[in-house]
Image: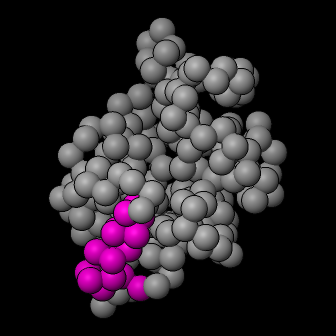
């Protein structure tokens, strides 16, 4: 059963929308999903599974926003719903403070894309037409240096995630921008 549900986007989306009502959090889930799925394609991995892990990585955050609860409560909920340990551990690993190791390529990709997808979205919102089509790597890097801009985004996690992925920052940013451009309607960008 668990292998089927972890590949069923409609089912995973129903869980996301049951627990998450905020438009910005839904769009964040879709942005991270978009970037992670693009990496799954690049690495010839299972796109639906990778995408669903990304889709659900923060599904519990709106109800359980503290470090004491998120993503622990989400993991418990997903266990009750029949998701396997690998799926849940990957989600746990996106939060450094859980101490869950990022020992799979998927866990590294999820961590690398989480904060960056949110940051690219923030950069797009300050562009004249508020579209990801206007976002360039150099503007993302410049905004990363501005600590007042999108201050809730952890720049250290972006850098650390890129290093764990074994790529260059500019390359990772460009890859995620291109992925998000292909899904800009769903992302509202």
Taking the spot 75% from the left edge, 59% from the top edge, the residue there is 164
Magenta span includes 70: yes
Q: Is residue 56 visible?
A: no
In the image, farthest residue toward the bottom: 1
Task: Specify how the rendered protein is coloured.
Answer: one colour
Q: Is residue 130 above or below residue 46?
A: above
Q: Is residue 33 left or right of residue 99?
A: left
- Residue 21 spot, x, y in % from top left: 21, 46
Q: Is residue 64 left or right of residue 116?
A: left
Q: Is residue 85 visible?
A: yes
Nearer to me, 15 or 60: 60
The quarter in which the N terminus is drawn is: bottom left
Q: Is residue 181 above or below residue 17?
A: above
- Residue 20 spot, x, y in % from top left: 25, 51
Magenta span includes 148: no
Q: Quadrant of residue 23?
A: top left
Q: Is residue 4 above or below residue 142?
A: below
Q: What is the span of residues highlighted in magenta in the rendered image?
A: 69-84
Nearer to me, 141 or 66: 66
The quarter in which the C terminus is drawn is: top left
Taking the spot 34% from the left edge, 43% from the top edge, the residue there is 25
- Residue 15 spot, x, y in % from top left: 24, 64
- Residue 120 spot, x, y in % from top left: 55, 32
Taking the spot 60% from the left edge, 41% from the top edge, the residue there is 154
């Amino acid at each position: 059963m668990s292998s089927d549900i972890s590949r069923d986007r409609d089912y995973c989306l129903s869980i996301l929308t049951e627990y998450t009502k905020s438009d910005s959090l839904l769009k964040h889930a879709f942005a991270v999903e978009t970037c992670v799925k693009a990496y799954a394609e690049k690495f010839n991995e299972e796109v639906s599974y990778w995408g669903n892990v990304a889709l659900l990585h923060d599904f519990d955050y709106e109800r359980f926003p503290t470090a004491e609860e998120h993503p622990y409560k989400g993991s418990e909920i997903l266990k009750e719903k029949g998701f396997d340990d690998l799926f849940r551990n990957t989600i746990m690993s996106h939060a450094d403070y859980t101490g869950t190791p990022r020992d799979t390529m998927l866990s590294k990709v999820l961590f690398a894309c989480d904060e960056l997808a949110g940051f690219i979205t923030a950069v797009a919102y300050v562009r004249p037409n508020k579209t990801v089509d206007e976002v360039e790597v150099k503007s993302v890097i410049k905004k990363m240096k501005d600590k007042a801009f999108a201050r809730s985004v952890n720049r250290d996690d972006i850098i650390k995630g890129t290093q764990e992925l074994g790529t260059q920052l500019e390359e990772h940013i460009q890859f995620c921008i291109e992925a998000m451009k292909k899904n800009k309607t769903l992302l509202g960008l």
